[in-house]
Image: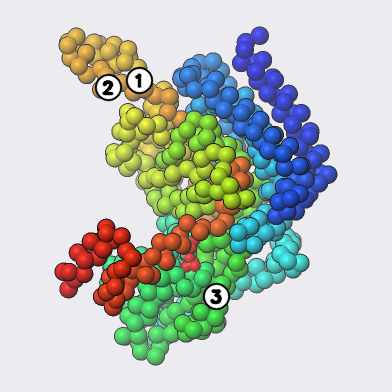
Amino acid sequence: IPGGTVRATLHRFLRNVHQVFSSSRNFATRTRFQNKEATLAGTPQDARQAALSDAWSLVHGEASRLRPIHLSGLFAEDDKRFERLSATLDDLLIDYSKEKLDEAALDALIALAQAADVEVRREAMFSGEPINLTEGRAVLHTALRAGADAKVMVDGEDVMPKVRETLDRFLAFAEDVRSGKYAAADGKPFTDVVNIGIGGSDLGPAMAVRALAPDADGPRLHFVSNVDGAHLADTVKTLDPARTLFIVASKTFTTLETMTNARSARAWVEAKLGQDAGKHFAAVSTNLDATADFGIDEARVFGFWDWVGGRYSIWSSIGLPLAIAIGAEGFRKFLAGAEAMDRHFREAPLSENLPVLLALVGIWRRNALDLPTVALIPYDQRLDRFAAYVQQLDMESNGKRVTHEGEPPHSETGPIIWGEPGTNAQHSFFQLLHQGTDVIPVDFMAAVNARNGMEGHHNLLLANCLAQARALAFGRSEEDVRAAMAKKGASAEEIDKLAPHRTFPGDRPSTVILYDRLDPYTLGRLIALFEHKVFVQGAIWNVNSYDQWGVELGKELAGQLAPLVSGEATNTAGLDASTKGLLSRLTKDRK
Ligand code: F6P
């Protein structure tokens, strides 16, 4: 019997044993998530730590076994690799067979997810437990897309009636803006809508409006986020204040960038419309006192709740710009897509669960193979802001250096995510991906069918996507390069000189995500897929994926420096020499 088969059988046996123990444990004891003394699933802390530590050792053992084997070797060994290492949910397919793992490694990863109580934590999230421990909040973006009969309790209250009422209200407003029933001060329809927000109050709707361009048949949408005045100035340059509606979107309604842009936008509208400017503003926030102070009529204020994190808020009234673009029906399809992914995530076994598998592949890359970054490359031009969206979703969630208990985590946490659409990326940074000294795993995304009516383009787009994944995995050996050059008549001297430069090492992992076509339903599924992937990884690392203290220090220091930059204050005592030097340069020549 080949060694690999024995190992795989042994792993499967251990996994089954573990599964029996963990499911009876989960069934018997549903200790509240936040009760650190009693621990997560009712297992004594030491036993839980020991099980986790064993699971990590198993994963690292698998990595040591697989590291020396080239991806071509893994494919040569097993002609059913694609069948074994891919998973589907309806038309959505994830092919992770070009990752440097095999079934035994996957079994070890699944055992790790079980030892980390991913299933118990998942239930805690869906059922409204306050899993955001540092802020004492539930995490319930899933409630925003829950089905008609769902009941979700927070602090003893079913939140669903209010969720549905708010959804109906903001979708009705979106339809009124689209139809012209809610019109500008002069009674004519709005032609342009500008969303002012940043981070989670910008990236989601901005990304989704671009992604769903074929579905957008309402007024034109624009997004202003940066406090750099260029963003607002360049956006309004071609707009008419009489035809423009502004949505001020901010969970807190205190964010410096958003409030600064909102005040400037109001001045711009007031300069032309005077008293009537108010009709041209709507707001989305959890801070209804602040929206009232800003002077926005409560009929055009749409709320949400503190249990919706900013980067998880596109499903709430933060999605208003998207609803204005694609209409209420389109927005409901978008929610239905996310709900389908929620159901799958909650119900499918870990070994067939798309978000879990994506998360485990990420853990494998990050922790077992020590690969800290991921390039996210949609071969889908309309997803050109998807990497930026996932950057906030993932890096603000899991960019954490302590566990729930405030201790250093067992291993490295959130990956560094970056990316651009293919094929453009091929003509910029793919050189380094193929031949650089760092191995950078790639997540490819592509639609099987295009929605652009441009004959022939989509075949070329898809061929390029598959070609890149192949080139990364299998490369081109020096031997092949030499043979090909000799065949073309190159001299021995030329071959010696150029062969090393023309060789591709390969063995560079990638995952391909395919979907039938990019429509509201599928976009909903894709975003929820990544949300749950982040959840699973956060659970395995035992970090709080739902706070973001790391953004606070910079905000505080900017507040202190602002008067020094503007010249309102001059006392630089206590500042470091570098900041003093830069300040003096900044203030010297300011016109
Ligand atoms: O600074 C980070 C952050 O707090 C994000 O988490 C959030 O999405 C963004 O700022 C915007 O916050 P708000 O919606 O409150 O304006």
Dot 2 surroundings within 10 Å: few (below 14), some, or many (20 or more)?
A: some
* Residue 432, image x, y percentages: 32, 34
Residue that badge 3 annotates: 287
**Residue furthest to the front:** 573
Q: Name the element at disc 3.
A: loop
What residue is rendered at 39% in x and 48% in y? 381
**Residue 377 placement: quadrant:** top left
Give the x, y percent position of residue 142: 63, 57
Q: Nearer the viewer, residue 24 or 533?
A: 24
Circle 1 SS class = loop
Number of on-image labels: 3
Q: Which residue is mark 1?
A: 476
- Position of residue 174 relative to residue 518, above or below, is below
Question: Which residue position holds label 2?
Answer: 502
Among the two numbered marks 1 and 3 on one chain, the one whose residue lies closer to the N terminus: 3
Quadrant of the frame with the N terminus:
top right
Mark 3: which amino acid? Answer: Asn
Quarter holding the C terminus is: bottom left
